[in-house]
Image (cartoon, rainbow, N blue to C red):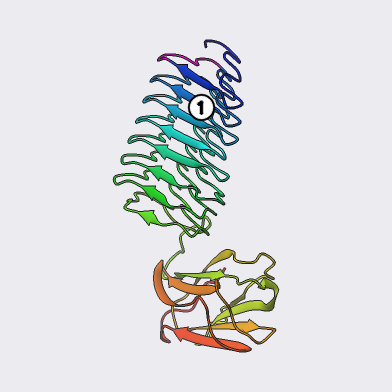
Amino acid sequence: CIGPEACENAGEDKGKVIIGPDACIGETSCEEIGVYGGYAMLDSYTCRGEYACPFAGAEEGNVTIGPRSCRGQGACPIIGGEGFAFLGEDTCTGKEACMYAGASEGNASLGSGSCAGQNSCERAGFGGKGIATTIIKSRACRGPASCQDVGRDGVGMTSIGSDSCYGERSCYNVGRDGSGSIDNFMCFGPYICRAQDEFAPCVGTDVKITVEFKTDNFPGESSWTISQTCGSGFSKSSDGFTEDSTVNIDNYCTSDGEFMFTITDSFGDGLSNPGYYKIYKDDVLQMSEGPPVNFEDTYTNSFGSCGGTPPTTR
């Protein structure tokens, strides 16, 4: 299976294909092997080259790929989608390698030392609506944005092993908005494992205020306002919410002081499950409630104390 499009569609439609080591080398080689309920088993050092082995094991298929495989830009994309992808150690090395592995009702298991490269393994297990499970073992996710959005919007378990997540935005939003668990992983560097947008550091004595707000099933009824009560003039409000059951995160810089947070519900039944809020100051949780947040028309809570230097807001 050497060369562009080599061994394309092998083992598809409930068939079976076994490929030995040092195979599937070249752009789009081994494309769609084991798809549509088929099974593909590849040995070590396979799927090497730009976009090698795309869609392997997709559409309810299964694919097993040996160690030190899926190497090259975009190698092994969307493998195991709606199916199952099992990869050995030191796989998915290269920019955008193994993106969307096991996504969309699929399952993905990646061995130790995997996902080393910019955006490698991004969105693996993303949007799993069935029993999707994404397991990434230790020493993994080492590169900018590697393993970003892994397990996001899924209902299965997301697990990343120890000594993982190195690089800017690596493991960012892992398991976000899903009901699965995130087990035993460590984070090193800026903006890592953080379910929030990029935000430049505040200057001088200003503090960063973060509002994390998850809407309930009726997003258009909810709004919030946060303001400083010590005369600084700082006051911010939510934009109109349109997406239900969605986490929204806003960051602001202002002087320190006492802050008042108010939620308003136009229907008068509060913020129901799965709605909640969390307020952070310099990434330290100050107050939270929910789900649900029980009130009728208006809810108010505050934190901090008056005093400090005049603000510079943005």
Magenta-drawn stretch, dominant element (helix, strand or loop): loop
Furthest-front residue in view?
Answer: 14
Confirm whether the magenta stretch covers residue 56: no
Q: Rate crowding at label 1 as few (under 14), some (14 to 19) or many (20 or more) other CA atoms within 10 Å.
A: many
Question: Is 162 located above or below residue 8 in the figure?
Answer: below
Kindly give the residue lying farthest to the top in the view shown. 2
**Quadrant of the snapshot with the C terminus:** bottom right
Q: Residue at 41% of width from left, 81% of height from top?
A: 308
Q: Position of 309 compared to 240: left or right?
A: left
Residue type, label 1: Tyr
Q: Position of residue 140 (x, y in %)?
A: 36, 39
Residue 289 makes an appearance in the image:
yes
* Residue 72 in view: no
Q: Is residue 6 left or right of residue 134?
A: right
Residue 189: horizontal and vertical position, in percent? 37, 49
Quadrant of res 242: bottom right
User: Residue 123 location, x and y as percent?
Assistant: 52, 44
**Residue found at x 46% / y 26%:** 70
Q: Position of residue 55 (x, y in %)?
A: 58, 30
**Total numbered circles:** 1
Q: Which residues are magenta?
A: 20-26
- Give the quadrant of residue 57: top right
The magenta stretch spans residue 25? yes
Secondary element at image label 1: strand
Task: Give the residue drawn at x 59%, y 14%.
Answer: 4
Q: In this picture, is 83 found above or below 293?
A: above
Label 1 belongs to which residue? 39
